[in-house]
Image (cartoon, rainbow, N blue to C red):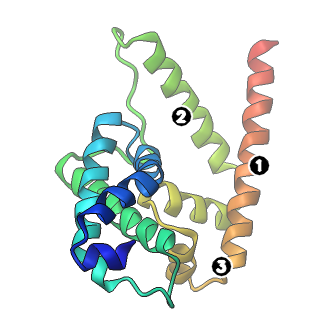
């Protein structure tokens, strides 16, 4: 489809959106969480795809992989741009609750505090991998490159860390019920 788009075939544009629109929108929703922001981002991603369609090389990657790579890069760029505009708190700092804070925000804050507490109980290697993934949005490959560690080791640290956090949070929830 991308070679047809690069050649100016307008029917290929509609076919591409029909085929990959859900996949791109789903990725945008996971990155951005806001439906309207995900809509905007999806449109921007497809506009970018039309511009770079000629660079698609069938021998280098599948079409869906190429599209997801472009989408992921644009979404990371958007998140970085948004974070540059608005200074957000670090994972390590959570604001004290205001007295007029709605109940759901209080619950979210409490859950965040519990998750941070669980994260601090992990071995340093697991903490580092999860922090790079959560705070900076890095992929496992990017983390492996940054830390100079094999990709398999990074994936193992992340998996073990997430499993341990789940265990710790489950214990915490059990204590709250008692």
Q: Which residue shows up at 58% across the image and 70% down it?
A: 140
Which of marks 3 and 2 precedes in the sequence? 2
> Which residue carries the number 2 mark?
112
Say above or below: 64 vs 96.
below
Which of marks 1 and 3 precedes in the sequence? 3
Distance in Å between CA atoms under marks 2 and 1: 16 Å
Distance in Å between CA atoms under marks 3 and 1: 20 Å
Dot 1: what SS? helix
Q: Which residue shows up at 50% across the image and 72% down it?
A: 65
The location of residue 100, given as percent across then percent down, is 33, 8
Badge number at residue 151? 3
Q: Which residue shows up at 67% across the image and 43% down it?
A: 118
Q: Which residue shows up at 78% across the image and 13% down it?
A: 177
Asked if the residue at tag 1 contacts the one at tag 2, i.e. Cβ–Cβ closer than 8 Å, the answer is no
Badge number at residue 164? 1
The location of residue 48, given as percent across then percent down, is 24, 67
Dot 3: what SS? helix
- Is 31 displayed left or right of 81 in the figure? right
Q: How dense is the environment of label 3, judged by Cα within 10 Å: few (below 14), some, or many (20 and up)?
A: some
């Amino acid at each position: 489809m991308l070679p047809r788009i690069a050649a100016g075939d307008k029917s290929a544009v509609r076919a591409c959106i029909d085929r990959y629109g859900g996949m791109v929108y789903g990725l945008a929703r996971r990155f951005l969480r806001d439906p309207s922001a995900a809509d905007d981002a999806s449109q921007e991603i497809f506009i970018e795809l039309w511009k770079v369609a000629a660079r698609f090389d069938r021998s280098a990657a599948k079409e869906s992989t190429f599209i997801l790579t472009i989408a992921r890069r644009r979404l990371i760029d958007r998140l970085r741009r948004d974070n540059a505009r608005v200074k957000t708190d670090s994972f390590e700092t959570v604001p004290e609750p205001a007295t007029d804070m709605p109940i759901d925000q209080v619950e979210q804050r409490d859950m965040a505090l519990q998750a941070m507490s669980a994260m601090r109980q992990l071995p340093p290697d697991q903490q580092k991998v999860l922090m790079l993934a959560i705070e900076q949005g890095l992929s496992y490959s990017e983390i492996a490159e940054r830390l100079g560690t094999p990709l398999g080791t990074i994936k193992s640290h992340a998996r073990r860390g997430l499993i341990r956090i789940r265990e710790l949070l489950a214990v915490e929830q059990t204590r709250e019920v008692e």
